[in-house]
Structure formats: C-alpha cells, structure tokens
Amino acid sequence: MDFAVFERLLSRTPATRDQITMRVFRALERHPLCRGIRFEVVETPRRTNGGNWTVSLHAINPAAISEASEIVADIQDAYDLAA
C-alpha cells in the first residue's frame, strides 16, 4: 500500500451518520449546481480501522454529477463513520 494512502486512512476523523449527513448537505448547498440534491448516507461493511460509508444521490441534475461526486469524495476522504 502506498504510504500516502495509508496515512490518509489513519487520519480520518470519526463522525456519526448525522454529522456526515450535515457536512454533505452543507457542502452540496454551497455549490450552485448541487443545491437541492436529495441524498442518503449509506453505511457499508466496516473496515478494520473504522466505519465505511457512501452517499446515494437522488434527483440530481445531470450537469451536477461531476461536482457532486467530487464534493462527496472529498468528505469521504476526511471522515469515518463512528461506531
């Protein structure tokens, strides 16, 4: 495993589903194309060092897919789902 990837995995901050939902909501609302996107934070099988999660996007404007995906990826890099 690349050291940078390993270091990033260890540096994730634990957060509850509600906290992650709020962060995703606020980040999407800041981008003009992503405002009003409906989404759901979904827990996925746990890793050994923390909870894994993803976001299911609903009712999204096709022009916003790339931006919304990048926003979610940045948040996923920063947070683990707390137990």
Image: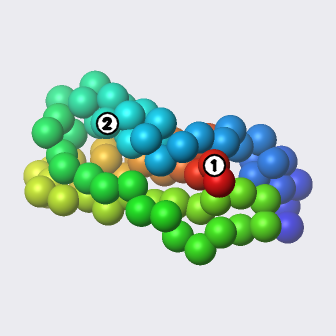
Q: Residues within 10 Å of mark 1 (few under 14, many from 20)?
A: some
Q: How is the image coloured?
A: rainbow
Pick the front one: 27 or 1: 27
Q: Is residue 71 visible?
A: no
Q: Position of residue 51 (x, y in %)?
A: 64, 59
Mark 1 or mark 2, which is nearer to you?
A: 1
- Name the residue at the front extreme: 83
Determine the image quadrant of residue 3.
bottom right
* Quarter of the figure with the N terminus: bottom right
Q: Residue at x 71, y 57 (%)?
A: 50
Q: Earlier in the sequence, mark 1 or mark 2?
A: 2
Amino acid found under the numbered disc labelled 2 = Phe
- Name the residue at the bottom extreme: 45
Q: Is 1 situated above or below 31?
A: below
Q: Is 44 situated above or below 60?
A: below
Q: Secondary structure at mark 2?
A: helix
Label annotation for residue 25: 2
Q: Position of residue 69 (x, y in %)?
A: 37, 53
Pick the front one: 68 or 41: 41
Q: Is residue 82 visible?
A: yes
Amino acid found under the numbered disc labelled 1 = Ala
Q: Secondary structure at mark 1?
A: loop
Q: Residue at x 31, y 36 (%)?
A: 25
Q: Is residue 58 left or right of residue 18?
A: left
Q: Position of residue 65 (x, y in %)?
A: 25, 54
Q: Is residue 37 left or right of residue 30?
A: left
Q: Which residue is mark 1?
A: 82
